[in-house]
Structure formats: C-alpha cells, structure tokens
Amino acid sequence: MERISLSQKNLEHLSSRIPIPSYDREKLSSSIVHIGVGGFHRSHQAYYLHQLLKQYQEMEWGICGVGLREGDRKIAEIFQQQDSLYTLIVQHPGGEIESEIIGSIKEFIFAPESPQKVLEKLAHPETKIVSLTITEGGYNFNAATGKFNFDNPEIQQELAYPDNPKTVFGYLTAALKMRHAQGIPPFTILSCDNIQHNGEVAREMFLSFAAKQEPDLASWMEEALCFPNTMVDRITPVTTEKDVQYLEKTYAMVDQWPVVCEPFIQWVVEDNFSMGRPPLEKLGVQFVKDVSPYEKMKIRLLNAGHSVLGITGALHGHPSINACMEDAVFSSFMRKFMDEEASPTLNVLDGVDLETYKDSLEGRFSNPNIKDKVSRICSESSAKLPKFLIPTLLDNLESGGSIEYASFILAAWCYYSDKQKDEEGKPLEIIDAMENELHLAAKYTEDDPSAFLGLSEIFGELGKNERFRSSYIVHIGKIYQKKDIRSLMHQMLQG
C-alpha cells in the first residue's frame, strides 16, 4: 500500500485502513481549552471527548490545545502538519491491538510564538472549561508547606510584568481579567493531574497568585470560579519509535506522534462547573459530590505502587514496569506495601472492593504490551513522592502502623539520587526539576546518614520523627553497604 501521512485532507484515503472520526471536524467548536497536551491527555480526556462526538454529535465540546513551554514546540509542529490529529493505540494484555484516529483536538496554539492568540482564546465567550495536565510540579507549590512558591523567577517576572505572561498562572489570570472587564462569566478550571484534591490545590494556587498580582480581580475569582476535583486513570507510557513504525507497517500511515495506552480508563469528577460541561456521564464518567475517596485510593495504591516499582526497578536495572512485575520479589514487595501500609490508611468506598482493585492493578502493571519505562515513572519524583507516598507514611506514624516499606523506598530514592546509576553501573535517566538539589542532598556519610531528609520542601518535619528516622537510617545503611536492592527487598519479604 502507498504510505499516507496523517492529516485532515487524507482522512478519506485512510478510512479504508483504520477508523477515522465520524463527525465533521469543521463544525466542531472548541469550548474546552486544554493546557499541557501530552500523552495522557490524548489517551484520556481527548479520547472521552472523541467518543462523545462520535456517538452523540455534541459538537460544542471540541478541544483547543495550548502549549506554554518551549518544550511543547515538537507537539506544536507535528500538530500543525497533522491538523491536530493523532492515532491512539490501545494495547490489550492478550496481545490484541485496537487503533483509531482521534479528532477531538480541533486546534493547537503554541504560546511562545502566539501569546496574544492564547489570551484571546482563553478570553473568548466560547471557552467554558480550561483543563490542565501540567504535572505535579506545574502547580508551583512548596511540597512541604503546600503554599504557592513566589520565589519562582518566572512568577516574579509575571508579577512585575502582568501583560507578559509566561506561566499558566499569568495566562489564566490575564484572561480572566479580560473576561471580567467584558462581563463574560469565568470558565471552569479543571485539573486532571495526579494530585489529591487537585481542584482544591489548583484553587489555592491560582487565587494566591491572583491576590498578589490582581487583588481586585482575586475577590471576583474567589466567588465566581469553579475548580472541580477529579480522579483520572489510564496508564499511558511514552511513545517510542516502534509505535510509529507499527502504524507504518500495519496501516501504511505516517503518524509522527501516536499515543499508546492500556484498555482500562476511569474518570471521576466533582459536578461543579460554572458554564456547563459535556455530558460525559453517557460514556461512564462518574460525576459525584466528593471525589476524595476515589482519588486517595488511586494515588496511594496505583501511583505509589508505580513509584515503589519504579525506584527499586531502576536501581536493579529493570527497564519497564511490566519487567518489574515479572520478577516475583518486586511484585511481592509492591503488594506487601499496598496490603500492609497503604490499604489501612484508606476509607471504605461504596461499590469498591480493595482486594479486587489491587488485583486489577497487578494485572494492569503486568501488561506485557504496555512497556512503561521505569524512567517515566521515576520522573519528577520530587513532586510525586510528597503526594503519593509520604502521606501514607505520615498516617501510619500517627496510627502506629507499619512504615518499613515506605521508609525503604525513601532510602532507595536517596541512593538513586546520589549514585544516579543502576547496580551494573549504567547511568539512570533522571528527569526531575530538583535533580541537582537531590543529588547534592543525597551524599551519604556515616556521620550524617539522614542528610537527605534535610530537604524540607520535600520532607517537611518528617526527618525529626524518631521512629521514622531510625527506620530510615537502618535501611539507608543496608542499601549503601550491600548495593543490592533486590536481595534487600527479598530479606524484608522473608521477615
């Protein structure tokens, strides 16, 4: 077959090879502006909207993607060539693969080149929801205090020059100022990031910034803006060249940046919107009064479980999460953490059996076709662990529960940050905004074995807790002495 590049004009030619959007994208309105168009957004929110458009022709609810960072240039260039189209490749555990072209993202704006266009889009009355996947670090809070970080140089610049926004805070505040002046109701700010109480966190961060930059606007924002809490779930590994080649070989189609994901998908949303919302309940999205129990379960089991596997797996040399799960020591260690430390801290959730949920996580992590790199799971651990792992540890310290597995993981993270190599001496791919600070703080000495815990922005007062500190010091000593994570994990499992 002749190779065809993915674009709007080529959809008809591709329709005999692969499912394409069944709706008229020309008639699509983009009432949702999404900031942070990465793989997860494209496998999750954009997929849900695509299904809504296919099945119910709800043409109002298309997406305008926005990239605020220079790092978004690649997706901007590819989306310009592909008319914001991409392929979603769903990998089933049994080997079945389902692929389809997703068309719910109608347009994409690259802010570094078109800042005014971004502001105009955000301020337009058509925009009803601004959704976010900007990672944990994008919310600019101090992990230990939970307060907005006004020392960030970009924030300082925006406070001094409010008409020249750079961050999500500057752009949304400027757009809301424009809407307020024109009598346009505020859009809903919908966080879709893996942060417990993500809507509440977003609310506090945006209002903190606005109160400093635009005090008169902040009171209106506080009264009028909605920040729903959400829980999102779909494992979405980083796209590889093999995925691109798979589409070329299977469909003779050139898609420069497809997305791969697992079949499982879940979205739980607090039903709190200022200008309406898409009827996603038609597709199984749960709209509830309180998302907290769902997000707490997911963050402390799935996300923390990922970190438990990722940090130890990286040190041992396992390349992916499914490779960790194929190793009985790693899979058993993770389950022990879930059973003995995470589960006792969770609320009873109507309609959810925790044992069944944990079993399902083991199956999802083991999917041999979702080769989720441990480097992706370990990325930005400085932002993830204070939200995914440390709250469980704190709860167990308060209740007298087990802390050994969580303490071991934090000790392993210190070793990971210090050595930055696996047990065979191969360099680790470390992706973390605090990489340098972590590396410097993690220099282990017998005179000060808990020096790493001095990073107060991550650990807060945790290092002063004698029970935790004693446990941590024991584990860190063994790790540096033995330098064999797997054997230490095996010893812990043997009791």
Image: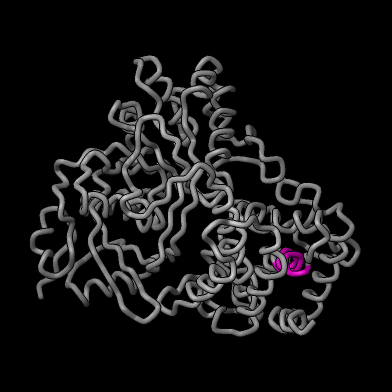
Name the quarter where the C terminus is drawn: bottom right
The residue positioned 55% from the left and 58% from the top of the image is 298
User: Could one spot residue 7 in this view of the protein?
Assistant: yes
> Left or right: 4 with respect to 244?
left
Main secondary structure along the magenta-highlighted residues: helix
In magenta, the rendered stretch is 404-412
User: Could one spot residue 418 in this view of the protein?
Assistant: no
The residue positioned 60% from the left and 77% from the top of the image is 426
The residue positioned 49% from the left and 35% from the top of the image is 227
In the image, residue 134 sits, relative to residue 181, either above or below, namely below
> Left or right: 288 with respect to 83?
right
In the image, residue 426 sits, relative to residue 446, either above or below, namely below
In the image, residue 388 sits, relative to residue 252, either above or below, namely above
Residue 42: image quadrant is bottom left
Asked whether residue 156 is drawn in magenta, I would say no
Query: How is colour applied across the structure in the image?
Result: one colour
For the residue pair 450 and 188, the one nearer the viewer reads as: 188
Asked whether residue 410 is drawn in magenta, I would say yes
Question: Which x, y percent locates residue 394?
Answer: 76, 54
Count of labels shown? 0
